[in-house]
Structures are given as C-alpha cells and as structure tokens.
Image (cartoon, helix red, strand yellow):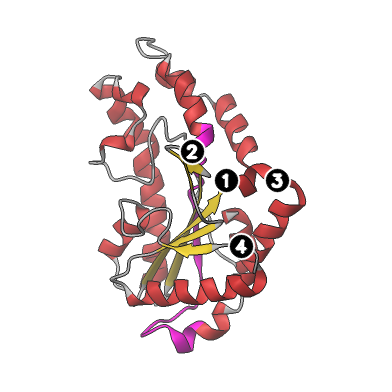
Amino acid sequence: MAKELAAKLGGVVVASEVSRLLVDLNRSLGNPSIHGEAIRAASDLQRREIVERYYLPYRAEALRHVSAAVKRGVGVVHISSHSFTPKLHGKLRNADIGLLYDPARECEVQFCDLWKKSLATYAPDLKVRRNYPYAGKGDGLTRYFRGQFSPADYVGIELEINQRHVFQAGAPWTALRKAVIDSLRPLYREIGDTLTDWRILAPMFILAFILPEMLIAAANFAISFIGDPNTVARLVSPRSAARSLASVV
C-alpha cells in the first residue's frame, strides 16, 4: 500500500523488513512492548545490539527525510501505513479503514476529515472511521515527529486497513488500494485553501506495514527459541526476511 502511494503521488518510502518480534520500529524505546517475548528473554547486550543495528538507523533515516524537507520550507504529510486484525479478543472490528491522527493538531483533524469525505466518493461501500481501531495520539513514529516539528511543518496520519481485505487479495484488494490512492489526489487541490496555515509542496510516505495475525503466528515460532543462543540470528536471517517481505507484498 505505502509503496504504491509513494509511487503514484511522488513520495518517499522508508521501509524495513525487520519483524516486530525482534524490535517494533513504531514504538518508543521505553515502551515495554518494543520487543517480542523471545527477545525480552534475551540478554541486555543482545537487545542493545538489536536496537543499534535496526531501530536507530531506521528512525534516523526517517528523521533525516522529514528534517530535510522542513529545512527546505516544504510541509510534510507523513502517511504511516498499517493493517489491523479483523477480530481482537473475540470482538469484530467495525471498520474497513481507520484514519488515525492527533485531535489536538487541527491540521491533522482537517486532513482526515477531507480524506474521509473523499473516500466516501471513491469507495462508498467501505466503512471509514477516524481514530479507530486505535487512538492516533498513541505511542508511534508519528507522535515522535509531532514532538519534533510544528503543526505548520508536519502532519502525521496513520492509515489502518482491515486485514480481511489484505488476505482476500485479488481484484478486491487491488481495487481498494486504487481507491485509497485516488481518494488522496483531490486533497492536493483543496488542501492549500482548507488546512489552517498549511503548505503542501511535496508529500512523504513512510512504510510501517504491520500484519498482527502473521506476527502472532510467528510469535509461537520465535518463543520456542528462548534459551537458544542462535535466537537473534534466526529471527533476522536475510532469507527469512525476504520470505516475510514477499508474503506482505
């Protein structure tokens, strides 16, 4: 999804093939869930090496792109693309698409209002909800950037897509991706007049695909590695990473 958004709308993708079981790049370092259970059982040295090898470079690259755009006087729209499991703790999620934002940042409120209305035109059968199934101001990369940049320079939106559409694949999944992309195009014509004190000269898209169902299945595999000195090596082997990426795409 994020790669197509960037390709069609001229954005930049910052991507990683590292599993959340190893380190969750969308969580702050102080978050207890930043590592999966197997890695939480690893040594302090192993966890520090994982952070230095995977987490810090990813965050630094994303920050570099946003900072460079802001320094050039370019407003940044950051779309962090995720998916969510259709059912959690036995309860069905009542949405096809979620648009997450910080209610305290008026630019983000207005952006999501426009996007939701546009999606209603391009995909009227889809149920789109704001700040669902998660709170947009929760721990994540967008919240970190909000602390670094003013609302006049940075808009951070998380796009959440119900995994039932992802797993359905085929023509319906292709049509949904097209509708999401097409729904963003009209925003460029309206956004300059609609968003308060906002300048959009170029968008920026950051890939953060998360497939919880897939990760839950992988967690059982990873947890079995506890006590195995080769835990980290197995979790981050290039061959395994390649398979994981292919399955997402």
**SS class, disc 3:** loop
Q: Where, by quadrant of the figure, is residue 106 drawn?
A: bottom left
Residue furthest out toward the right: 171
Residue at the spot of label 2: 212
**SS class, disc 2:** helix
- In the picture shown, does residue 232 fall above or below 20? above
Residue at the spot of label 1: 163
* Amino acid type at image mark 3: Ala
Real-space CA distance between mark 2 and mark 1, rounded to the nearest whole angstrom: 9 Å
211 drawn magenta: yes
Quarter of the figure that contains the N terminus: bottom right
Sequence order check: which comes first, mark 2 or mark 4?
A: 4
The boundaries of the magenta stretch are 191-214
Real-space CA distance between mark 3 and mark 1, rounded to the nearest whole angstrom: 10 Å
Residue at the spot of label 3: 169
Residue at the spot of label 4: 126
Sequence order check: which comes first, mark 2 or mark 1?
A: 1
* Amino acid type at image mark 2: Pro
